[in-house]
Image (cartoon, coloured by chain):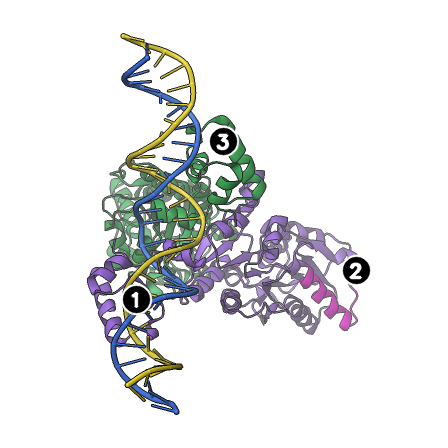
Chain colours: A green, B purple, C blue, D yellow
Amino acid sequence: MTTIRELARRSGVSVATVSRVLNTPEVVSPDTRERVLRIAAETGYMRNESARTLATKKSNLIGLVWDTDHRQPGWRHPFFQEILVALKSALSSHGLHLLMLANPSDADDGMRDQHIRAVRRHNLDGVVLIDNGSHDPALLALAEDAVPCVSIDLAVAGPGTTYVTSDNEGGARAAARHLIERGHRRIATIAGPQRTAPGQQRLTGFRAELDANGIALPEEYVVGGDFYFDSGFTCMQRLLALPDPPTAVFAAGDAMAVGALRAAAAGGLRIPEDVALVGFDDIDLAALVQPALTTVAQDKPGFGTAAADALLAMLAGDPAPAAPIILPTHLVVRGTT
Amino acid sequence: MTTIRELARRSGVSVATVSRVLNTPEVVSPDTRERVLRIAAETGYMRNESARTLATKKSNLIGLVWDTDHRQPGWRHPFFQEILVALKSALSSHGLHLLMLANPSDADDGMRDQHIRAVRRHNLDGVVLIDNGSHDPALLALAEDAVPCVSIDLAVAGPGTTYVTSDNEGGARAAARHLIERGHRRIATIAGPQRTAPGQQRLTGFRAELDANGIALPEEYVVGGDFYFDSGFTCMQRLLALPDPPTAVFAAGDAMAVGALRAAAAGGLRIPEDVALVGFDDIDLAALVQPALTTVAQDKPGFGTAAADALLAMLAGDPAPAAPIILPTHLVVRGTT
DNA sequence: AACCGTGATGTAACCGGTTACATCAAAGAC
DNA sequence: GTCTTTGATGTAACCGGTTACATCACGGTT
């Protein structure tokens, strides 16, 4: 392994000069710079990141905490994939790498703060949290730390902390409005868990839009799911079993919406003729079921790039934005309405 | 930040002794050990990983190269999610972290070897490659490196290199056998790309089983897809348009199988009455379409744990296994056969 | 001619660990 | 009683960078 001392020896300059060529090339004379760079290229020099991190306390590493859910297959967050692609791509174009941190929920109790410790131990420059719905207090503790932190769909507060989420309320209103415009008056919802921010906000938006249109929402028209397929199925069954069943349903997540779709089909109902259905998320599956699901689309890559941008700004010294970053949603009309 | 020098000062021993307490506690006397540990706990000492890496050249970091495909939504590899969960969980229980490396395909040309360089720059202890189907030569170059390397569904060779894959051939034979047992004789296949190992092996297995049963496979019964939904759709249309269309189809991937399902439905055919269908992978979607897809299931978490185990063994000094690690598959019979 | 500012470079301390080697006291061998 | 072994600990070099400060040559002032 070539080191800067070796480069210095070969090019007849001091280690400091080599270091300057690599970090602040403008302060070194053109000819030495050129000579050192040439020799560096010839010898295939690569900087040792550990040594640099040790000296500067900056690692160019961003921690990623994304807590998986062991009770369910796949991820909690519907867009983990797309978020990760966009996030990584945006970060790596700035020379930052992602380090996956320990999963708080599968650590034993003594290890609950593993990811916080990792921030210190590896001199991480920042952290990205992706909501898992579990609201682990250890996660929130991260936000209180000094390190820049961006979370996705998880409302955290603290200095150097911000979060990005979709316009859940607006999206839910759009879904409700769409159903109203289609002439529905008996509209129910399969809500998400009310301890999650998206779950709450989507229910709030849904309520608000019905309210604004003077449409009543009986208590039994609000049933609570957990964002997964199975809960959508059983919730829909409950709704259809009501004495006065709804003619339209807004499911606060596509997986639940697909579950609802199956329940309706199993009950012999035609969609959208007998009951209309709108989902939320626009996961890949939404376009593949039949009939294809009308849903509120979130800007999937937008999560990743917005998180990266916010992080980069904070790394550049900007203060954390006071307000969360809210991404627009849009209604995608398909076959279920 | 507490350092070991600080700990040494506070507990009245030398830095070497503190380091020993942390790394080889058995060589230090019980009372000093206990005292140092107590003071370390009191002061909230955390080891600086960069310094340790610098000194030992071991980072406890594993690189993850998983190349995304920008032409398609989602990942190339159908199980990226589950693999990652299992992999990370297995690795982190051994104190190893995953570092996501630059994506070779979205790097500009000067950066094609970014991920190889990262191995050196960050002193990575090993690398996991997840196949993207692109067969980037820069990926393969990694395997020639000295660092322990495990790849998934990508046949690479080199010292310190092994790979894990499913029993694609066996799985494909099982799929074919199942269709034969159902009485089918005109059986076609929507194959995967033949430049990928799984694509090849599944076609080989399919052919072998038909052959073993004395069933002819006309050339027009083999159509090539790209593992994605759309190709499954168009391939199925081609098959159904044949003068003598098949009564059963084996699709080498579930996404293609679902595409085929839609094409059959669009063509007014009933499944499985008019045409039977078997997929491969057992992605989540397989159970959610209607009729639910009969398919060859792969051991999704098995990929992650097998890769982790192989890597850990190599880190412990074992030579790389000469033979690839082959995970068993099993047929899941659902509604399409 | 003495002085100063400036730009390029060198010297050496420092970041926080690890570890080869030295030291030393106590126990055991003869 | 001396010698050797053993176990516990200390000293200091080293890993490969960064950077504050010092040095020095040179052109411009006065």
**Can you identify the residue that label 3 sits on?**
A33
Instruction: Please determine if labels 1 and 3 lie on a single subunit.
Output: no
Is residue B165 left or right of A194 when viewed as pictured?
right
**Element assignment for label 2:** loop
Residue B51 lies in the magenta stretch: no
* Local crowd size for mark 3, using a 10 Å CA cut-off: few (<14), some (14–19), many (≥20): some
**Element assignment for label 3:** helix
Mark 1 to mark 2 CA distance (whole Å): 75 Å
Which chain letter goes with mark 1? Answer: B
Relative to A88, residue B177 above or below = below
Mark nearer the viewer, 2 or 3: 3
Work out whether residue B261 can be spotted.
no
For the point 24% across and 38% down, the residue is A322
For the point 35% across and 41% down, the residue is A311
Magenta stretch bounds:
B200-216
Is residue A243 left or right of A266 when viewed as pictured?
left
For the residue pair A141 and A243, the one nearer the viewer reads as: A141
Magenta stretch, main secondary structure class: helix
Mark 2 to mark 3 CA distance (whole Å): 66 Å
For the residue pair B114 and B328, the one nearer the viewer reads as: B114
| Type of the residue with mark 1 | Thr
**Can you identify the residue that label 1 sits on?**
B17
Q: Position of residue B174 (x, y in %)?
A: 65, 71
Which chain letter goes with mark 2? Answer: B
**Can you identify the residue that label 2 sits on?**
B218
